[in-house]
Amino acid sequence: MFKKRAFALALCLVLAAALCLPAGAEELTAGRFALPDFDVPCKGAILIEQNSGTVLYEKQPDQQMPIASITKVMTLLLTMEALDSGKVTLQDTVPVSEHAYNMGGSQIWLEPGETFTLDEMLKAICVSSANDAAVAVAEFIGGSEPAFAELMNQKAAELGMANTHFKNACGLDEEGHLSTARDVAIMSREILTHHPSITHYTTIWMDTLRGGETQLLNTNKLLKRYNGVNGLKTGTTSGAGVCISASATRDGLTLIAVVLGSPSSADRFHSATTLLDYGFANYAAAPLPTLPERPLALAVKGSAEDSVPLDYAALPETILIEKGTASALRAELTLSEALEAPVEKGQTVGKVSIFQDDTLLNEYEVKAAADAPLLTFGGALELLWQCLLGA
């Protein structure tokens, strides 16, 4: 009896933990690849593949620490969401408050009452890591920096960034303003996946504001040193050390390397380069193998609809593999011969399994792309009547 109760309690705890994970939470796991044991000069680091979120390297990935201006990745993420929702536009003018004016660190020397377009502010944030611009945008989006910080924390919770707490929008050292390499990778992946247009700003090497009076030079020197780099954000404070979240794409494979707490800028870029080199040398984004058959619809029994169309949208274009193993990939489709009504749009009706030799790599859901309601007695009579009229 005691063993049964203990087992039941353990099961409840597991289920409760699963239910507590936010619905939109991202999961970064090592998956099927063994992690290397080389070291890089920093306090915390992680390397992930963007498409799947697979972890390819980690060093103290869940240790909380300050992250300096990498904080601005979340500020940019919320700004991009506001743009997508229509709450703001790139042409909107962003006012400058006394609070934004008083920001220290990297800045574009905003003056109270001065205005810039949101487009210009994004350039200042992404290229020059301007703290004053980040706070001005936070106030514009959230009403105040503290209110915006609450939005940042809400988004962090939604993404499953369990070890992150934001106190400001720019990343200046403040007690309790902490994150981890894994959490930084999560928000970096989120913005690159769902708002890829951010790279329009993060890839700018040089630009100007105020009619050419203010020069902007990108703080991410990898843009000129590393093939394929398209972002994302650097950061440096006395509390955080020297940090970077670097993203790069080669041959369809996008990697995100997060380096926190480096002792110097040279160490930061060396560590990021080492991680990216390791990823591109050992892994590839292989095209998903072609299915032998890919029916467009599936028969339905017990409905006025003869069939429902099938939705294969869950299938990615590529799958992460170790280099040189693409020839061993194959795909299998599992579908019923027919479905029983009712069928709802979005209902899972089958799956596509990807194998490497006999090893299952991943499975993707196939869904119904339309409804097929149950045929009632009244519906059957109406259908019969229509058939008779048509005859």
Image (cartoon, helix red, strand yellow):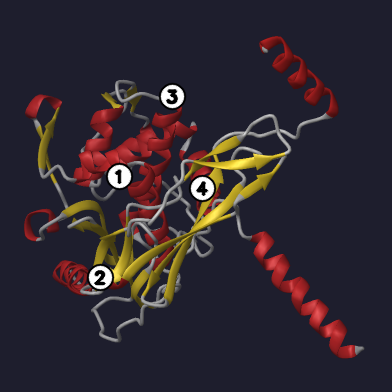
Q: Which of label 2 and label 3 is nearer to you?
A: 2
From the viewer's perspective, is 372 left or right of 208?
A: right
Name the foreground residue: 236 vs 25. Answer: 25
Please state the horizontal and vertical placement of residue 2, each as a whole percent of the image. Answer: 89, 89
Name the foreground residue: 50 vs 372. Answer: 372
Quadrant the N terminus occupies:
bottom right
* Residue contact at pointers 2 and 3, CB within 8 angstroms: no
Please state the horizontal and vertical placement of residue 253, each as a whole percent of the image. Answer: 24, 59
Q: Which of label 4 and label 1 is nearer to you?
A: 4
Task: Identify the residue position indicated by label 4 in the image.
Answer: 155
CA–CA distance in space, label 4 to label 2: 40 Å
**Circle 3 — which element?**
loop
CA–CA distance in space, label 1 to label 3: 25 Å
Task: Identify the residue position indicated by label 1 in the image.
Answer: 131
Task: Identify the residue position indicated by label 3 in the image.
Answer: 86
Q: Is residue 284 above or below residue 3?
A: above
